[in-house]
Amino acid sequence: MSAAPSPATGLATGAPAPGPRPPGRAAQFGYGLGDLASNLTWTTLTAFLLFFYTDVATLAAATAGTILLVGRVADAVIDPVVGLAVDRTRTRFGRARPYLIFAAPLLAVAFVLAFTSAGSGTTAAVWAGVTFVAVGICHSLVNVPYGAMLPMLTADDDTRLKMSGYRFVGASLGLIAVSVAVMPLVLSLGGGDLRRGFTEMAIVFGVVGTLLYWVVAALCREQVALSPDLAKAPTGQAVKALARNRHWLGVCLASLVAFVRLGTITAGAVYYARDVLQDAWSTSYILLAFAVSALAGSLVTPWVLRRLGKRRGIVIGLIVTAVLYALLFPLHHSPAAFLTVFLLANLLGGFGFVAAPALVSDTIDHHEAVAGRRDEGLLYAGYSFATKVGTALGGSLFAWALAWGGYHADQVSAHAAQAIEWAFVGLPLVLCLVQAACMALYDLERQAPVAAPAD
């Protein structure tokens, strides 16, 4: 790891410290592969695990929703612990990279177990709960260090925004892979047996994800050094400083709401396609439209936010998205029109997803300026906690909407279909406005000349 001083060092001595060179294109692209790996597991879980629970493992919808929420909150509590561990890790591999190398295979195993079922009734529910918590903990062991790497790789704000874009490209490719490959793999590998098909699909995705995390570890090198004194600072001091960072709180609250929206959309796509659009294959089209909007958003977001400002650009995108979601209600009779407006809405509503890693990095710099310490792992863990709880809450809210509508897998009533439509369209509309309000807490815009668009 480079011995270059952190930005705080230059401020303390009164002279600017020369920073390390920004990561090259290979490292920037390689960093984005981490979110491709993450989404092969994370998006598959959020998009298909509820369906696996209700229609394959035959759990009641309310039971499945409670497992998703309680399990995700339980494993999210691990995030700050992992973050603190990252802040105190010192190895020849660096501070974050060892977790990508050694915890990725554990995540793959836990992912496969989550898509297996055991017994029925209480036994099946307990197995689902235990394996869901296990895969969440393993995801924390990989994803928190991965996210905390960004401010360790560069202190340059423009490079961070570019790398956030690469990261979202990876996430978008993961969404596309999930949308077009999961069900075909399940059907082909299982030979018509959904139970076996989901398990074997998970094996394929788990192995590919592990290899991708190892590529990230090979290409990315941590360059922003940590002062030795910061590693010795008490944990309580770090938490107190964290609570006073309103910009970080704003990013975390906005991200929590954003991921409630994401969890609702990914968990509800299969139900909305089959029971509202009356076309089960539209599940792939909905997820593909969402993935394409995310990929396009990853390319245009840095350009838009450099011109409008991060907060202003995100808020404008969310307000327009809410209007577009209102237009979706009468379009369920026209799948093509629905998918077109849905894609545009999620393109504009995705600015916050793309920019989030850069926003967290900004709050880490602010944290260092006011508290004299960086705590990358802890601050990113708080953000990761918000995304996990948000995604779980989104999936659980959708599951509870199914229960409220009297959903039964063998026969879907008109009341259940209406509940699905309101949960899939109406809830994200409201959440866009709530997320925009949360962004009022963040105000760390850089007073710098407008950068030229990325090549």
Image (cartoon, grey):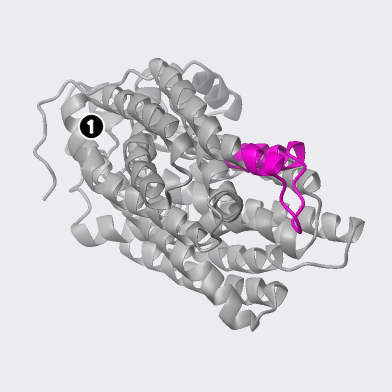
Rendered position, 356 above or below 439: below
x 91%, y 56%: residue: 122
Q: Does the image show residue 384?
A: yes
Instruction: State the extent of the magenta-drawn residues as a range.
Output: 391-419
Residue assigned mark 1:
305
Q: Quadrant of residue 138?
A: bottom right
Of the 4 image quadrants, the one containing the N terminus is: bottom left
Image position of 443 (left or right of 283): left
Q: Nearer the viewer, residue 196 or 22?
A: 196
Rendered position, 263 above or below 43: above
Q: Position of residue 401 (x, y in %)?
A: 69, 37
Q: How many marks?
A: 1
Q: Give the dominant element type of the magenta stretch: helix, strand or loop.
A: helix
Q: Furthest-right residue in view? A: 122
Q: Does the image show residue 1?
A: no
Image position of 205 (left or right of 453): right
x 73%, y 57%: residue: 53
Image position of 248 (left or right of 28): right
Q: Nearer the viewer, residue 434 or 450?
A: 434
Rendered position, 305 above or below 438: below
x 45%, y 28%: residue: 432
Tell me which amino acid carries mark 1.
Leu
Q: Quadrant of residue 102?
A: bottom right
Mark 1 surroundings: few (<14), some (14-19) or many (≥20) residues within 10 A:
some
Q: Position of residue 351 (x, y in %)?
A: 33, 36
Q: Position of residue 253 (x, y in %)?
A: 51, 26
Q: Nearer the viewer, residue 282 or 167?
A: 282
x 48%, y 29%: residue: 429
Rendered position, 405 above or below 268: above
Q: Is residue 399 magenta?
A: yes
